[in-house]
Structures are given as structure tokens and as C-alpha cells.
Image (spheres, rainbow, N blue to C red):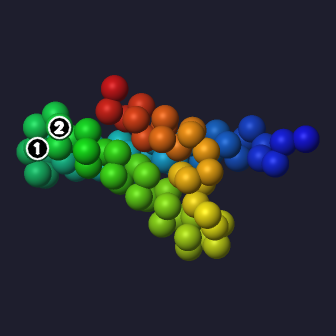
């Protein structure tokens, strides 16, 4: 039996994607960064937002350090 249901996994990855998309759009619109800046800020907000969320919920260690899926979801924002 899986420790995590598919619905919770989908919601978690959607949240990580949303954090990254928000960071990338902010980098483009407000800061007018180039593509490297947009990718960097998108990755930082995607992974950082998920880490902060997990710490506030008491889910330690954060999912970012337990599963490769969060890294992949953060990277999807930039491609």
C-alpha cells in the first residue's frame, strides 16, 4: 500500500508547480529578468515554497528532500 494517495500527490505537485509559475511570472513582469533569471527565480520559489509549506505543517523532512517529483515539478515551470 502506498504511503501517499494519488490525489494528494497530484495536489502536492500542482501546488509546487503553482509556486514556481508565480515566481517565474513575477521575475518576468516585475523584475524584467532575462531567461536565466526567470528560470532561477521559478525554481527557487517552487522548491522554497514547498519547503516552507512542509515546515509549517510539521512534515519533516520536507518532501523536496524525500522525493524527486518536487524537483521535476519545479523544473516543469521553466520548460
Image position, residue 7 (x, y; %): 73, 41
Residue 22 visible in rendering: no
Identify the residue shown where x is 77% and y is 47%.
Answer: 4
**Residue 67 x, y percent position in the rendering:** 61, 45
Residue at the spot 35% in from the left edge and 53% down from the top edge:
45
Query: Residue 54 falls in which quadrant of the image?
Result: bottom right
Q: Relative to 28, is 73 on the left or the right? A: right
Task: Provide the residue designation for mark 2.
Answer: 36
Horizontal side of 62 relative to 1 (left or right) equals left
- Name the residue nearer the viewer: 79 or 18: 79
Estimate the x, y position of residue 31 in percent, counting from the top left.
Answer: 11, 51
The residue pinned by badge 1 equals 33
- Residue 32, relative to residue 79: is it above or below? below
Q: Residue at 26% of width from left, 39% of height from top?
A: 39
Bin the neighbour count of mark 1 within 10 Å (Cα to Cα): few under 14, some 14-19, many 20 and up. Answer: some
Point 10% across, 37% down: residue: 34
Residue 62's quadrant in the figure? bottom right
Report crowding for label 2: few under 14, some 14 to 19, many 20 or more residues within 10 A (C-alpha). few
In the image, residue 63 lies at what x, y percent? 60, 54
- Dots 2, 1 in contact, CB < 8 A: yes
Amino acid at each position: 500500500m502506498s504511503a501517499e494517495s494519488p490525489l494528494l500527490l497530484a495536489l502536492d505537485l500542482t501546488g509546487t508547480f503553482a509556486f514556481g509559475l508565480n515566481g517565474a511570472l513575477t521575475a518576468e513582469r516585475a523584475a524584467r529578468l532575462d531567461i536565466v533569471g526567470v528560470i532561477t527565480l521559478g525554481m527557487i520559489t517552487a522548491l522554497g515554497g514547498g519547503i516552507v509549506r512542509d515546515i509549517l505543517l510539521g512534515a519533516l523532512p520536507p518532501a523536496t528532500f524525500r522525493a524527486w517529483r518536487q524537483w521535476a515539478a519545479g523544473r516543469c515551470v521553466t520548460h
